[in-house]
Image: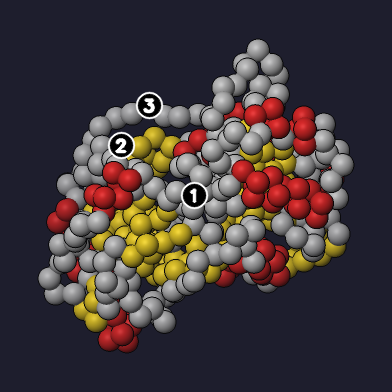
Amino acid sequence: MKKTKICLVAVICTFCFAGCNTQIEKDIIGSEASSAVPNGTTTDETAEDELSEFVIDFVPNRIDLAEYQNQYRDEINEIKESSYDTISLQDCEMMPLEGIEQVGVYRLYSVDMGVDESIEIIENWLEEIGCEDIDLETKLRDASGQYERNESRDYPYDYPAVYEHYPEFDSGHGFFVNTNQCYIQMGSDGIYSMSDGSITDYLGLDSLAAMDALGVNEENVVDRGSISEKSDAVWELADGEMTVGDAAKLVTDYFEAGTPRQNPPGISVDIPEVEVFALEDKYGYAFSVRRVYYGVPFAYATTGGRTYYGTNYDIREDVKTAYVIDHDTVAAFTGYVDAEQLEGLIEEQTEIMSLKDAVSLLNEFFAANVRLEVCKAGLVYCTCKDTAGNRIAYPCWQFEGMNVTNTQMMRVYVNVLSGDVYYYSYREG
């Protein structure tokens, strides 16, 4: 079975079409780094000034979170038995709500990577994986765009050599090494992507190790599902049998330890889903990774090309996949960095819109050409990027399912403080 990729089509209450982006190896390696901000800064000053007077219009009739947790299960049963014109939750899997005391609205920002800090992290990492013999004078490259590429040269030497311009760089985000032995790329808050080369080595490939981190060597997927469903499943990895649950614990421990910057207070790591892929005669695990902030998970998505619709802001869910092929450590990963910082924009709230009210709102919100059959729902933080470049995490009820009128999948978010609706359609393939 081939790994499922998705093409996301974001819609924010308006329909403005844009072209679908495809990314090749060089674009992916440079994409995260080129969006970072200068060394030691956190965000664009103009954007930050706009947020200094951030306000939110609260929806009326919010319910106390502590009290609501006691009636949440009863309300789910009531909703599943009810009939709505545009939305159905009869076969919906509901995420738990226990232990959540409050929610807030947060700006996500980076304290950018210093030049020497970036080089030191790369040197230490190479030593840890036994690749300290790599010549950084020639192999250490920069994909941040601070200096021009030489497109007449072959990859990765078309990217500027770091030591040809050291120490004139403004920051160290985007520094990378990509060889057959290993691969690492620095983001703004730590390691954004890496492969220790073990997957490439096990398969006997001559390709660059970045292909491990980007999932290219994970095409033959033989099983997939939620961690709750697959936790006890046992597969033969490169060095012997290991349960999905034990491998997932290895991944959470790895990211909670920092890569290498420490995560902000309140941030933990969660593994919601797994794919099992063939590794010749053995197998490996590919885990979807997301953040959790004081009990509320961040919305996450799988990798894939995306087309966004709308002009106000884009939905930016957590996207990270980590690969395990033995009992030792994470072999490769690519995605957001957990050390990203959070700044509260309003006082934390202990009252939210109920699930029942959110469903009623959506029933009126959707036009007659939408008939959403929800398969999964729950409370999450949905991150949106506005036109000023701010990334803001809002607490939302998330609904995921199929619009049976056109057979497209949909993901819908209802802000539990303001009642605003954000949604997009996507196609699996």
- Tags 1 and 3 in contact by the CB under 8 Å rule? no
Q: For this view, does 51 lie left or right of residue 160?
A: left
Picture residue at 41% right of the left edge, 61% below the top: 342
Circle 3 — which element?
A: loop
Q: Which numbered marker is on residue 40?
A: 1
Q: Which residue lies under the disc numbered 3? A: 19
Residue 302: x %, y % from top left: 51, 48
Which is closer to the viewer, label 1 or label 3? 1
Dot 1, how many residues are within 10 Å of its Cα: few (below 14), some (14-19), or many (20+)?
some
Q: Reading the chain from its start, which is encountered first: label 1 or label 3?
A: 3
What amino acid does circle 3 point to?
Gly
What amino acid does circle 1 point to?
Gly
Picture residue at 25% right of the left edge, 32% below the top: 16
Picture residue at 70% right of the left edge, 19% below the top: 154
In this view, the residue farthest toward the front is: 167
Q: Disc 1 and disc 2: Cα gap in Å? A: 33 Å
Q: Is residue 341 above or below residue 211?
A: below
Q: Disc 1 and disc 3: Cα gap in Å? A: 34 Å
Dot 3, how many residues are within 10 Å of its Cα: few (below 14), some (14-19), or many (20+)?
few
Q: Is residue 273 visible?
A: no
Q: How is the image coloured?
A: secondary structure
Circle 2 — which element?
A: loop
